[in-house]
Image (cartoon, rainbow, N blue to C red):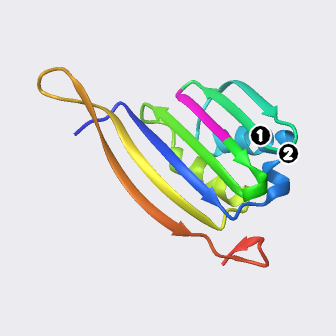
């Protein structure tokens, strides 16, 4: 069953509030995540809300990576979507979760653009949860 793209929807909790509130840091993490995930960056935009929170997107040749943060809750909503076969979106997701120091992640992988016999398209969803234990709130154990 071939798919046009992979879409990762991630609920990240227990994240470092200082990182989640820093638009420049989030931009840096996302641009590096694109490299780690073998994606070609085309553009990016990140916005810092007042008093808190960041929303941002990196447009890549393969599609996009986006985030919305709630530092006061230690929560981030991540979205990584790639088309084609060269990118590795799961590596990008893992990199982001590590750098925002997430303690927990609920991940849904959606295989998108699965062509049906009648030339329509559908998708399949696989979901899992991960407890990302870190020593001293810093490193994965």
Q: CA distance from mark 1 to mark 2?
A: 7 Å
Which one is in front, 19 or 87? 19
Q: Does residue 30 sit above or below 130 in this rendering? A: above
Determine the main secondary structure of the stretch shown in magenta. strand
Q: Splitting the image into 4 quarters, where does residue 37 fall? A: top right
Q: Splitting the image into 4 quarters, where does residue 35 fall? A: top right
| Side of 63 where 35 appears, left or right | right
Mark 1, other Cα within 10 Å: few <14 / some 14–19 / many ≥20: many
Spot occupied by residue 133 in the image (x, y as percentages of width and height)? 64, 75
Which one is in front, 52 or 111? 52
Figure quadrant of the N terminus: top left
Given contact means CB atoms under 8 Å apart, are the residues at marks 1 and 2 in contact?
Answer: yes
Which one is in front, 112 or 83? 112
| Side of 128 where 57 appears, left or right | right
Spot occupied by residue 82 in the image (x, y as percentages of width and height)? 49, 34
- Label 1 vs 2, first from the N-terminus: 2
Instruction: Give the magenta-colored segment's residue range.
Output: 62-67
Spot occupied by residue 31 in the image (x, y as percentages of width and height)? 73, 38
Mark 2, other Cα within 10 Å: few <14 / some 14–19 / many ≥20: some
Secondary structure found at label 2: loop
Residue found at x 79% / y 78%: 136
Figure quadrant of the C terminus: bottom right
Residue found at x 60% / y 66%: 104
Is residue 64 magenta-colored?
Answer: yes
Q: Which residue is mark 1?
A: 54
Q: Which residue is mark 2?
A: 22
């Amino acid at each position: 069953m071939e798919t046009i793209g992979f879409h990762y929807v991630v609920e990240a909790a227990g994240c470092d509030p200082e990182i989640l509130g820093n638009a420049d840091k989030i931009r840096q993490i996302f641009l590096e995540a694109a490299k780690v995930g073998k994606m070609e960056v085309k553009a990016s935009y990140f916005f810092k809300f007042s008093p808190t929170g960041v929303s941002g997107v990196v447009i890549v040749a393969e599609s996009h990576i986006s985030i919305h943060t709630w530092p006061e809750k230690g929560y981030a909503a991540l979205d990584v979507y790639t088309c084609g076969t060269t990118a590795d979106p799961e590596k990008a997701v893992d990199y982001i979760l590590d750098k925002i120091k997430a303690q927990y992640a609920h991940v849904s992988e959606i295989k998108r653009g699965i062509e049906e016999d009648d030339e329509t398209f559908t998708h399949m969803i696989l979901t899992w949860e991960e407890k990302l234990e870190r020593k001293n709130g810093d490193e994965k154990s």
